[in-house]
């Protein structure tokens, strides 16, 4: 299934949509985030201490990728993910594992997280992973981050299942399975975000 590109995100004003550009993560995006956005992030926010300049180089390793979403004011979202992983609920199924994801607060658009995840789902579809994704909700995000991922339609993985080789399961893993991808895409389309 070929999915359309993400072209817009709902405007923060609640009036219409704002055009966005999705592209492979460039060093300029990481540098802009670290100099213009990160200093304004609230303390305690999981990504407040991340250096996107360093994460840019992580995205250059084999099977790793990065993407950026840009709106009128510049970079509004960044992600780094592993394109060679699997679901915890069924290790036979390949998935893209989202390592790092940051959405700019207080900007012209809202729904940046959905836009980032959709763009990764789309690439997963094009790459043969059927759009499946997996991620870990940083404990610093507390219950609020768990609620956010559930609201996006991701399923929380049972803490009873083993985690990944280098990351034990603390009950904060989420997945978007093949069956949930269709609903996620439909909801993103319903919001008018796709071209």
Image (cartoon, rainbow, N blue to C red):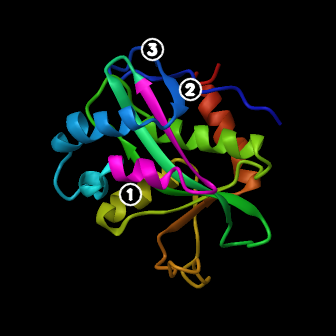
Q: Residues within 10 Å of mark 1 (few under 14, many from 20)?
A: some
Q: Earlier in the sequence, mark 3 or mark 2?
A: 3
* Residue occupying image coordinates x 38% and y 34%: 29
All told, the count of numbered labels is 3
Q: Residue at x 56, y 21 (%)?
A: 7
As drawn, the residue found furthest toward the right would be 1
Name the one closer to the observer, 144 or 21. Answer: 21
Q: Earlier in the sequence, mark 2 or mark 1?
A: 1
Rounded to the nearest angstrom, the CA distance separating label 1 from label 3 is 26 Å
The magenta-colored residue range is 53-70
Where 162 falls versus 137 (above or below)?
Answer: below
Residue 106 in the image: above or below residue 145: above
Quadrant of the rendered structure where residue 141 is? bottom left
User: Seen in the image, is 190 located left or right of residue 138?
Assistant: right
User: How far across and down, in percent of the image, does residue 162 sit?
Assistant: 60, 84
Residue 55 in percent (x, y) is at 40, 52
Is label 1 in a helix, a strand or a loop?
helix
Q: Which residue is mark 2?
A: 191
Quadrant into which the N terminus falls = top right
Other residues around mark 3 within 10 Å, as few (<14) / some (14–19) / many (≥20):
few
Position of residue 192 relative to residue 59, above or below, is above
When asked about the image quadrant of residue 190, the answer is top right
Q: Which residue is mark 1?
A: 145
Label 2 sits on a secondary structure element that is loop
Residue 68 lies in the magenta stretch: yes
- Which numbered tag is attached to residue 16? 3
């Amino acid at each position: 299934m070929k999915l359309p590109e993400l072209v817009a995100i709902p405007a923060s004003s609640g009036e219409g949509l704002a055009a966005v550009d999705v592209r492979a993560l460039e060093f300029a995006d990481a540098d802009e985030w670290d100099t213009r956005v990160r200093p304004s992030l609230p303390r305690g926010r999981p990504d407040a201490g991340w250096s996107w300049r360093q994460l840019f180089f992580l995205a250059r390793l084999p099977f790793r990728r990065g993407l950026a979403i840009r709106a009128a004011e510049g970079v509004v979202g960044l992600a780094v993910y592993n394109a060679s992983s699997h679901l915890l609920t069924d290790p036979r199924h390949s998935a893209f594992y989202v390592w790092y994801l940051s959405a700019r607060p207080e900007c012209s658009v809202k729904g940046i997280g959905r836009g980032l995840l959709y763009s990764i789902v789309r690439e997963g579809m094009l790459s043969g992973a059927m759009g499946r994704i997996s991620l870990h909700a940083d404990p610093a995000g507390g219950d609020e981050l768990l609620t956010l991922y559930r609201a996006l339609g991701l399923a929380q993985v049972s803490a009873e299942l083993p985690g990944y080789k280098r990351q034990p399961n603390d009950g904060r893993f989420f997945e978007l399975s093949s069956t949930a991808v269709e609903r996620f895409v439909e909801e993103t389309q319903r919001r008018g975000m796709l071209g």
